[in-house]
Amino acid sequence: MDSQPAPGSGDYVALEARYGARNYQPLPVVVHRALDCLVWDVEGREYIDMMGAYSAVSHGHLHPRLVAAARRQLERVAVTSRAYYGDTLGPFLARLCSLAGFDRALPMNTGAEAVETAIKCARRWGYRVKGIPDGQAEILVARGNFHGRTSTIVGFSSEPEYKAGFGPFAPGFRAFDFGDMASLRAAAGPHTCAVLIETIQGEAGVILPPPGFFRELRDWCTRERVLLIADEVQAGLGRTGRWFAFEHEGIRPDALVLGKALGGGLLPVSAFLADAAVMDVFDPGSHGSTFGGNALAAAVALEGLCVLHEERLVERAAERGPYLLERLHEVQGAARPLIRAVRGRGLWAGVDIDPAHGSARRLVEQLARRGVLSKETHETVNRFAPPLTITPALIDRAVGVFRDVALAAVRTASHSA
Ligand SMILES: *Cc1c(COP(=O)(O)O)cnc(C)c1O
């Protein structure tokens, strides 16, 4: 046995930097383990997770019921491919469909794959049901969207960083301004088959739709025979204090894309949901995924839905979300002009940082140093999306640290001005 000192955080950072592709710029926190809303690094320092892996960890880290479900399934079977039936997929899909109110669901793994599924379904529906000439279908997408990272999806992103050097891109997408019906109408044409839209734009900075926008959009889609497809990969499954963010808007989309929290924080599980008249454009051989709907994923995802329901996590988000926002508004009041705005819905908040007075990335770094994990988006927004299990006491602790860090940034800025 050698007696070298145990590797520390710096060693692991160096290994990732040396052998990993450089497509991320992580905060220098090296996670060793996590439980519920807390995370510990290699040196044993404790952090409050106010990020929840972009909503993938809505149940909290390693929820005991989800770990137990995974263990049980691992005693039986994990992966068979969809060449066979299984005794976990049907129960999972049935529960998911009844919760979301759709006839059918198509399971995939990542959010981007479920979005790709939505795109294929919408186009085929456009040709076979709406009668659009072959190869001409168009899908309307909102500016500022984030739907994942495949080459097709980044092609209709409005973020230069996501697409530079990755073209040529697939045609058939037209952009409109999020929340603006006039802009949407101007982008539409006779070959429009669908509107693909996040109910709340997450990566854009937790941007809420203007009141009434989705009702107008719903009416327009019905009138024009255009599918309304809600991407709730980040917003769905309780994050906003309702099971689905579209419920706040008083509408029902024609199809729904889910991911992230669907895997219970353990596995990548995503799904595309629609009624039979739309979903049945898929026939055998037309679409698939080797791992999509595998037995382990289905068992964990089904248990995840049960946990959300039985532990009332959606209601908790509805209760604690406003408390988080209220506490962040207090910080805003104390840390002007650094913080321009605080907004959000449920346990999902975006804090706008005025770039003239500070940087979101620096705040996130300082928060991490003080034991609070969050993430900036677009240089100017601090985003908070803790597990739905978070307690008021942990919210107080995390927001207290945010307040200290923000006030220190205000003092530094005024001294150097
Ligand atoms: C994260 C996200 C995706 C992509 O999910 P991946 O699992 O990273 O592929 C798609 N849509 C929205 C709204 C997201 O937030």
Image (spheres, rainbow, N blue to C red):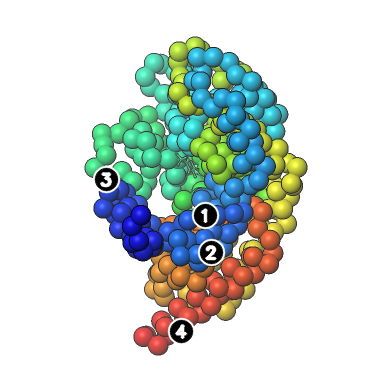
The mark closer to the camera, 4 or 2, is: 2
Crowdedness near tag 1: few (<14), some (14–19) or many (≥20) residues, C-alpha within 10 Å: some
- x 45%, y 23%: residue: 290
- The residue at which mark 2 appears reads as 47
Name the one closer to the observer, 82 or 164: 82
Farthest residue, direction top: 284
Specify the amino acid type for callout 4. Answer: Arg
Lower sequence index among marks 1 and 4: 1
Residue 262 falls left or right of residue 203? right
Name the one closer to the observer, 320 or 59: 59
Specify the amino acid type for callout 2. Answer: Tyr
Q: Is residue 382 at all visible to an observer of this figure?
A: no
Residue 310 percent across, percent down from the top left: 75, 42
- The residue at which mark 1 appears reads as 33
Residue 131 falls left or right of residue 103? left
Residue 136 percent across, percent down from the top left: 38, 22
Lower sequence index among marks 2 and 1: 1
Spatial separation of the CA atoms under disc 2 and disc 3: 35 Å
Specify the amino acid type for callout 1. Answer: Arg
Q: Quadrant of the C terminus?
A: bottom left
Q: Quadrant of the N terminus?
A: bottom left
Name the one closer to the observer, 165 or 301: 301
Tag of residue 164: 3
Q: Is residue 406 above or below residue 111?
A: below
Residue 247 percent across, percent down from the top left: 68, 42
